[in-house]
């Protein structure tokens, strides 16, 4: 290779990307143009010039038969980031065909195929990722989504049965076509499941997702209870493993056996790694849910960014304003709070127009991960014109995202509680859990009805291009987040006097779990046609 190529390699190692690009280009033509183009593509990618990276990677794989898997993968990765789904799918497939065996490559192929609505192909890719790389919850959830779209759960059933012989009654939950899945058949399957420990938690979780997305919520949550029970049994058998101790603790918290959960978690809370942080947050959540505020406070840790945030929250009356269309004229009450928190602050004109209903102030905004990632440039522009006291970003991708806000206003990452089985908090419970660690004097929730109202969001909360206002995945995401556990978690904190709500929110939180599921069944029934 010419000297300019090796100069480019040295500059690349020093992360001097533009100089490396110039050196590589000076090396063309060369004995191996594909290698040089690949290096140009990589340097362009690291510099953030994705269109240039895409063009260079495409040159690097022009002779597809000779292209190593990593070159095809990088082409797919950049095309993926540029939303060039067809190009990405072709490149990911080529990377795998060339011998690529990295499980995440199969997962990424599944994601782009899903975006292209090639549901069966996407499901096959996700299944390959799981078989090769373990049963990661995120991968499993995407596989479940494809099954909801195709209606075919047979391969999922076979995967989690692991060749176990089970009764036809139980197998029917995943292996019977939906039109034939009568109420009697589901009841028989659930009754058989109560008596038998043959199927693992993941199988019953699959049944929960399927039944939920068929709009059969009471039956879905009966399957979920079996998943929780199996998870605890499985984890206790393998309690020597850290992951299984965490799983067992989550199942214990779900069953309100907080003492058992804390006993499992205590040995894991002393470290500084991600596992110790997860264990501490889970243990703190268990303390919180049993009313032991001091116990939770002893487990919570704080960063420097947290300490700045604490000055905003500690001892203050906090209003957390959601996006539901409650119809209440609560604006004056909201604006009288010491601190007003909103979700996904991007359209201040709409906030001003709705001041009578939802107040005019915004002091802090919490941003959804995907929403912030998609709208970052617009959010930054809005915040320059409408400065807030702080923004809070999701943990996912925080390192890269926070750099964009540094110097503009205080930014920090929120803390997450995952202690309920299969629970991922929606915005209001997530914000509530995060804020409570900073010891506010009072927290009151507004415009939060757990999606039981007529509209998912009030008109104008999102504008065309912000994010899908009626996401076709909405019902599936309700099952993914577990809307019942979001409700139960918030209601528990309300029962402990840690939060209150406006009249609409309080009326929802006054429902029994059965009443909530009755109403949510009607709501899901209305939403399902848009999610099919």
Image (cartoon, rainbow, N blue to C red):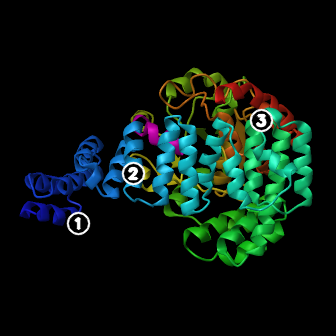
**SS assignment at label 2:** loop
**SS assignment at label 3:** helix
Comparing 249 with 4, the one in front is 4
Comparing 347 with 203, the one in front is 203
Q: Is residue 382 magenta?
A: no
Which residue is tagged 1? 13
Q: Nearer the viewer, mark 1 or mark 2?
A: 1
Could you tell whether 213 is left or right of 28 in the image? right
Comparing 422 with 453, the one in front is 422
Q: Position of residue 247 (x, y in %)?
A: 71, 65
Residue range of the region highlighted in magenta in the rendering: 368-379
Q: CA distance from mark 1 to mark 2?
A: 26 Å
Q: Quadrant of the C terminus?
A: top right
Residue 144 visible in the displayed image: yes
Which residue is tagged 3? 178
Circles 1 and 2: CB atoms closer than 8 Å? no
Which residue is tagged 2? 406
Q: How many numbered discs, if any?
A: 3
Q: Position of residue 265 (x, y in %)?
A: 72, 72
User: With respect to residue 40, does 464 lie above or below?
Assistant: above
**SS assignment at label 1:** helix
User: With respect to residue 392, does 228 lie above or below?
Assistant: below
Comparing 101 with 488, the one in front is 101
* Residue for point 46% across, 50% down: 410
* Residue for point 69% across, 25% down: 529
Q: CA distance from mark 3 to mark 1?
A: 56 Å
Could you tell whether 289 is left or right of 193 in the image? left
Could you tell whether 39 is left or right of 425 in the image? left
């Amino acid at each position: 290779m010419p000297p300019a190529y090796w100069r480019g390699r040295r500059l690349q190692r020093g992360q001097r990307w533009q100089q490396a690009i110039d050196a590589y280009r000076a090396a063309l033509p060369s004995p191996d143009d594909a290698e040089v183009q690949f290096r140009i593509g990589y340097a362009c990618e690291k510099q953030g010039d994705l269109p240039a990276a895409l063009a260079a990677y495409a040159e690097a794989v022009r002779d597809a038969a000779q292209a190593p898997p990593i070159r095809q993968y990088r082409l797919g990765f950049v095309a993926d980031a540029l939303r060039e789904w067809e190009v990405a799918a072709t490149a990911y497939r080529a990377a795998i065909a060339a011998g690529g065996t990295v499980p995440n490559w199969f997962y990424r192929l599944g994601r782009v195929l899903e975006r292209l609505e090639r549901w069966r192909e996407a499901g096959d890719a996700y299944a390959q990722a799981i078989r090769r790389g373990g049963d990661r919850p995120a991968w499993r959830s995407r596989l479940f989504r494809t099954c909801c779209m195709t209606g075919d759960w047979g391969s999922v059933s076979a995967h989690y049965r692991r060749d176990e012989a089970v009764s036809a009654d139980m197998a029917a939950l995943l292996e019977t076509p939906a039109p034939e899945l009568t109420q009697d058949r589901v009841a028989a399957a659930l009754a058989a499941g109560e008596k038998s420990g043959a199927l693992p938690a993941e199988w019953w979780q699959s049944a929960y997702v399927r039944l939920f997305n068929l709009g059969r919520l009471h039956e879905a949550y009966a399957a979920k209870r079996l998943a929780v029970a199996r998870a605890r049994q499985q984890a206790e058998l393998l309690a020597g493993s850290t992951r299984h101790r965490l799983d067992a603790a989550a199942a214990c918290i779900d069953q309100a056996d907080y003492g058992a959960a804390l006993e499992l978690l205590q040995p894991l809370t002393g470290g500084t790694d991600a596992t110790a942080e997860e264990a501490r947050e889970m243990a703190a959540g268990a303390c919180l849910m049993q009313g032991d505020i001091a116990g939770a406070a002893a487990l919570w840790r704080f960063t420097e960014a947290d300490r700045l945030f604490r000055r905003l929250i500690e001892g203050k009356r906090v209003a957390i304003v959601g996006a539901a269309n409650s119809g209440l004229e609560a604006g004056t009450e909201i604006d009288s709070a010491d601190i007003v928190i909103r979700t996904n602050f991007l359209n201040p004109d709409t906030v001003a127009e709705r001041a009578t209903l939802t107040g005019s102030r915004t002091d802090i905004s919490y941003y959804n991960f995907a929403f912030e990632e998609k709208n970052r440039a617009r959010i930054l522009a809005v915040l320059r014109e409408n400065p807030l006291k702080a923004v809070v970003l999701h943990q996912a991708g925080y390192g890269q995202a926070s750099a964009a806000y540094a110097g503009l206003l205080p930014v920090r990452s929120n803390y997450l509680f995952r202690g309920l089985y299969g629970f991922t908090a929606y915005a209001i419970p997530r914000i509530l859990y995060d804020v409570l660690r900073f010891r506010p004097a009072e927290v009151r929730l507004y415009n939060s009805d757990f999606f039981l109202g007529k509209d998912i969001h009030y008109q104008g909360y999102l504008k065309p291009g912000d994010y899908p206002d009626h996401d076709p995945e909405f019902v599936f995401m309700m099952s993914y987040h577990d809307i019942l556990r979001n409700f139960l978690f918030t209601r528990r904190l309300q029962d402990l006097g840690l939060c209150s709500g406006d009249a609409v929110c309080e009326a929802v939180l006054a429902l029994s779990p059965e009443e909530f599921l009755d109403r949510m069944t009607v709501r899901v029934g209305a939403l399902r046609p848009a999610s099919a």
